[in-house]
Amino acid sequence: KVINLPSKISYPLEKGDILVIRTGGGAGYGEPGERAAGDVERDLRDGFMSGGALHAAADAAD
């Protein structure tokens, strides 16, 4: 079962529980505007990039 938690919380864990923590990465590698369209689409679909981030990257590439 997946439980999405807020950024700051105390949550009791029990033996056998699995805790996965996802954090933002660094700024990335290379120029955002040079990424393959398929890579960008995959990041959007998988939730690694928001539409706002996509527009910001596109504006920076112009």
Image (cartoon, helix red, strand yellow):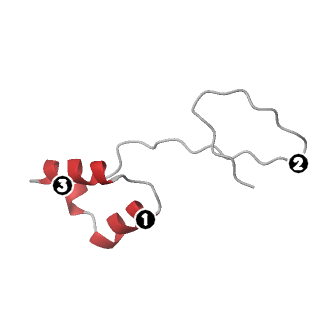
Q: Position of residue 8 (x, y in %)?
A: 61, 27
- Is residue 3 among the parts visible in the rendering? yes
Q: Indicate the quadrant where residue 35 lies.
A: bottom left
Which is more foreground, mark 2 or mark 1?
A: 1
Regarding mark 2 in the picture, which secondary structure is present there? loop
Residue bearing the label numbered 1:
45
Give me the residue at 69% from left, 47% from top: 3
Give me the residue at 15% from left, 48% from top: 60
Q: Nearer the viewer, residue 23 or 44?
A: 44
Which residue lies most toward the bottom here?
38
Q: Type of residue at label 1?
A: Arg
Q: Earlier in the sequence, mark 2 or mark 1?
A: 2
Determine whether, in the image, residue 32 is placed left or right of residue 1: left
Q: Position of residue 40 (x, y in %)?
A: 33, 64
Give me the residue at 22% from left, 52% from top: 55
Q: Earlier in the sequence, mark 1 or mark 3?
A: 1
Q: Quadrant of the N terminus?
A: bottom right
Q: Type of residue at label 2?
A: Gly
Which residue lies most toward the right here?
15
On residue 16, which mark appears? 2
Whole-Å distance between the Cαs marked 2 and 1? 31 Å
Residue bearing the label numbered 3:
58
Q: Type of residue at label 3?
A: Ala
Regarding mark 3 in the picture, which secondary structure is present there? helix
User: CB under 8 Å between callouts 2 and 1?
Assistant: no
Q: Residues within 10 Å of mark 3 (few under 14, many from 20)?
A: few
- Is residue 31 among the parts visible in the rendering? no
